[in-house]
Structure formats: structure tokens, C-alpha cells
Amino acid sequence: GAVVSQHPSWVICKSGTSVKIECRSLDFQATTMFWYRQFPKQSLMLMATSNEGSKATYEQGVEKDKFLINHASLTLSTLTVTSAHPEDSSFYICSANLRITDTQYFGPGTRLTVL
Amino acid sequence: SQQGEEDPQALSIQEGENATMNCSYKTSINNLQWYRQNSGRGLVHLILIRSNEREKHSGRLRVTLDTSKKSSSLLITASRAADTASYFCATELDSGYSTLTFGKGTMLLVSP
């Protein structure tokens, strides 16, 4: 079946640094990928919709300059958390849309801890 | 393997009927969450039920949780065509960390 990977699976960084998270569809092409974040014991929150070859669509309240999304190819989308702060510590998960079946496949998530 | 597994994989019903989807999981959880996804769109959160809760309601939605059987069900009553979507359960493990794991989803088709 379709597989989505994320890298890294967890990262610890210092405040003020930038962190890049990759989301890859391993055996299918995904024109659309979604980025979510989740705080402990809370529900998932959609951050943005990443479209291959065009600008991402951000949800209200999500800072575009803070969370940079690049969907440069049909199998890769990246989320860069710029100038990370402790409040950015969260679980980030991506999903990729397999267009032919209109099915979503989720990555395993990336746990970000900002010290 | 996936922590959460939904069944059925697909469900087709008529408007007005009830739709029931099930989710099973393997390990202890902190909470279980249900999401809906319309075609080509991002997930929409429906209900979060904690491990110490057995049932929650939200409008036409009813979620049950049986931790002894490690299963949950989502019931949509009096379904409407607009309920047509994919429904996912996600489990947050009772591990002290934030780790949400999704099942493969149930595709629900509600015909007028």
C-alpha cells in the first residue's frame, strides 16, 4: 500500500534555530499534501495545504513566514519552522493525497522539542 | 501496523439511515479522536474521547469507547448527503509523549 514517510521522526533544537521536516510519498505521486500540528492531549490542527508547484494555502492564524512550506516535487513537501521557540514544540504530521483514489495517507509524525 | 484500524473500509447508505464506523487499536491510549475528511480537503476534527470516558455526543454524532476491547465506534444518525466523506480515527498513546496515529479510514457514501 501507499506509504508516507517523515524525517526526522523527532528533533530537539535550541530556541532561535530553524528546523526542516520532510514529508515524502514513497510509492506514489501526491499533488496535494497537508501539514498538521498536534499538542499533547489535543486534536490535530490543520496548518496548511501544500500543492505541488504552487504556494501553500495556510489556515487562519498560521504564520506563513514562520512555517515555510515547499512542495517542490510530486513526492516531497517540506515544512521549515523558522526561528523556533519553545511554544513551537509540538507533534507535526503530514498526509499525502493519492489522487487516483482520493485517499489520504498519513506520515508517522515528527516530534519537535525546542529548548 | 497501524495503531488504529477502521472498519468497514467503505460504507454506502441512503439518506436518513444511520452509519456506524468502528475503530480498533492495540495499545493503551490517552485519547481517541475522530476526524472527517472531505474529498481533497484537510481533516476536520469531530470528537475527542478520553480513555476514562465511555460515550460522547456532538449533534448527530455519537462516539463510544470500550477500553477493555480496545475499540471505538462512531455513529452518525439520520445521515445526509453532506456526510459523504472519509472518516478516520486517531489514537494518542498513553506514553507521555504526543504521538497521534491514524487508521486507514472509512469512506462513507450517503446517497440522496
Image (cartoon, coloured by chain):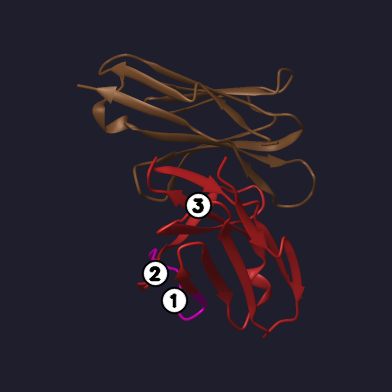
Chain colours: A red, B brown
The numbered mark 1 sits on a residue in which chain? A
Q: Mark 2, mark 3: which one is toward the viewer? A: 3
Q: Residue at the spot x=45%, y=63% of the render?
A: A74
The residue indicated by pointer 2 is: A56
Seen from this angle, which residue lies furthest top? B17
Pointer 2 local density, CA inside 10 Å: few below 14, some 14–19, many at least 20: many
Q: Position of residue A51 (x, y in %)?
A: 38, 64
Pointer 3 local density, CA inside 10 Å: few below 14, some 14–19, many at least 20: some
The residue indicated by pointer 3 is: A28
Q: Is residue B13 left or right of residue B25?
A: left
Instruction: Indicate the quadrant containing the C terminus of chain A: top left, top right, bottom left or bottom right.
Output: bottom right
Tell me the kind of residue under disc 1.
Lys
Which span of residues is magenta-colored?
A58-68
Count the numbered circles shown: 3
Seen in the picture, residue A9 relative to A80 is either above or below; the reply is above
Q: Magenta-highlighted stretch: main secondary structure?
A: loop
Q: Position of residue B107 (x, y in %)?
A: 41, 30
Q: Residue at the spot x=62%, y=69% of the render?
A: A21
Report the disc number at residue B12: none
Q: Is residue B83 left or right of residue B24?
A: left
Seen in the picture, residue A8 relative to A3 is either above or below; the reply is below
Give yes or no for contact between labels 2 and 1 (Cβ–Cβ under 8 Å): yes
Tell me the kind of residue under disc 3.
Phe
The residue indicated by pointer 1 is: A64
